[in-house]
Amino acid sequence: MKSWIKTHRFLIARRLVQLSLLVLFTLGNVYGFRVLTGNLSASLIMGVIPLADPFALLQIFAAGATVSINVLVGGVLVWLFYTIFGGRAFCSWVCPVNIVTDAANWTRRKLFLEQTERKIWLGRGVRYWLLGLSLVLSFLTGVAAFEIVSPIGMLHRGIIFGMGMGVAAILALFLFDLFAVKNGWCGHVCPLGGFYSVVGRLSLIRVKHDHTKCTSCMACKTVCPEKHVLGIVSKQSGAILFGECTNCGRCIDVCEGNALSFGVRNYINVGEKE
Amino acid sequence: MSQLNHEKATITERRRFLSLMAQSVGLSALGGLVWTGYIEEAKASPLILRPPGALYENDFMRLCIKCGQCVEACPYDTLRLAVPGENKPLGTPFFIPREVPCHMCTDIPCVPVCPTGALNKSSVSSIKEGEEKLDIFKAKMGLAVVDTESCIAFWGIQCDACYRACPVMDSAIKLEYRRNTRTGKHAYLIPIVSSDTCTGCGLCERACVTEKAAIHVLPNEVAQGKLGAHYIKGWEKADEKRLENVSQEVTTHTKRSEKKVEDYLNSGEDLFK
């Protein structure tokens, strides 16, 4: 048996990263502590390095505006980070909505909803349609279409600047994930998740599977928010190459046989076994 | 009948693909219509007051990335981001002068931090000694408007709270002295706002002594009218110059002006429609 820490280490690490980002942003707003100012849409590290949400920028472009160079640099930095290294790590390591939907998923398991509930079907491709729709509607309406309805924005802005009735929106999202569709928001609907799935498709950091150690207990598939990405588990060794894998590491946490681990994608000796 | 079932069973991949696409596109159109409807409602907020240097509302809405860095830079907590439930475009910065007005910092900390240019630095700068320098007096956040019925100065009671609160003193708000014929020996001290110099900071609205402010800031788009090009102050040389840039045709086009004066005046039916 692995110790509790061992089976939760990536979960704890992710929560630490998510919360400390929010704490730093909030300190920046409330106490003028200038390590990190702004929010997840656009920010400034130590008053120098700009960061920006590349999807928000894409919508702004679609809406027909040109932004100033600072925020452009910020967007490119973030884009490059996830393209080269992180993959879809934004969703599980940064986005605060992840905490809400993980909570819904945990509650769902505790209440045995999987076995009892009425099933509502929703395709995992919905997010890509919404991603396209966000850009089309930004073009048609002249405002960043997803940003003006985004519950992600409502939540991180809410925590940093004040929530208002955003609480209701987040509660609705929780209920949707709990009672309507398993991993409904993050795994099916969210266009930002769709965006990072596309952006992070070729990234270096990957979960790797060693099927010789696998006991086929399928604990990884129970916790995985995108379980179709774990198709190779217990069948063959290799890296999880789906863009939709959020690199959350929960599968690595729960794997008793140590058959899963983080690794770097093998681009050089292609053809060789990874 | 069996023929039909047979066909159903052997639906081609091509047909399946096409009908799935048709469904997806149709559902996207449905979602898009609802979504667009919401956006069009949500972005229309004509009474919102923006930070100094903000672009015109449409362009501002296009560019604002909702990062709140202007809000953080504001030392008076004047600015805040719209939260759900306020019926204002979500996440965009605004202020309510009666609660906290803009104190018109000379270094305008809220503007240079804007990462996208939704707050435009050069619109609140003026050239001094060949250098572009921030100049808060160029801000156009709105325009103060006086409700002459609830303003006690118009009753003849002496109050110059707004006049004294105004940071562009004796320019954005001037006091006009008028004889008070009721008493015969006093003067009305009437606040008159000039749109040339009023920045819309709202310090007057904050200072107003009435229960609900008798002077309040409205966005310029809402507060100001627009003259047709053919109204010229013939007695002012400067105003006459406007004629030079006017094209041949200077007529105000309204529904009524489609007809000749004799026609619309003589047809009573049309008039009362």
Image: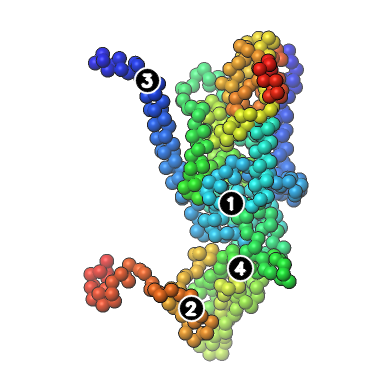
Image point 68% across, 41% down: which residue? A77
Give, as a three-letter code, the residue at label 2.
Answer: Glu
Of label 3 and label 4, which has the lower sequence position? 3
Mark 2 to mark 3 CA distance (whole Å): 72 Å
Select label 2 or label 4 by which is in front: 2
Name the residue that disc number 4 marks: B199
**Secondary structure of the residue carrying numbered label 4:** loop
Q: Position of residue A50 (x, y in %)?
A: 70, 46
Q: Position of residue A56 (x, y in %)?
A: 59, 44
Q: Callout 2: residue from which chain?
A: B
Q: Callout 3: residue from which chain?
A: B
Quadrant location of the C terminus of chain A? top right
Mark 1 to mark 4 CA distance (whole Å): 27 Å
Residues under numbered marks 1 and 4 in contact, where contact means CB atoms less than 8 Å apart: no
On screen, B273 above or below A6?
below
**Secondary structure of the residue carrying numbered label 2:** helix
Q: What label does residue B12 carry, if any? A: 3
On screen, B83 above or below A210?
below
The lab-note entry on whether marks 1 and 3 share a chain reads no
Q: What label does residue B244 carry, if any? A: 2
Q: Can residue A254 be seen here?
A: no
Residues under numbered marks 2 and 3 in contact, where contact means CB atoms less than 8 Å apart: no
Residues under numbered marks 3 and 4 in contact, where contact means CB atoms less than 8 Å apart: no
Mark 2 to mark 4 CA distance (whole Å): 29 Å
Query: Where, by quadrant of the figure, is residue B27 drawn?
Result: top left
On screen, B150 above or below A130?
below
Q: Callout 4: residue from which chain?
A: B
Name the residue that disc number 1 marks: A66
Give, as a three-letter code, the residue at label 1.
Answer: Thr
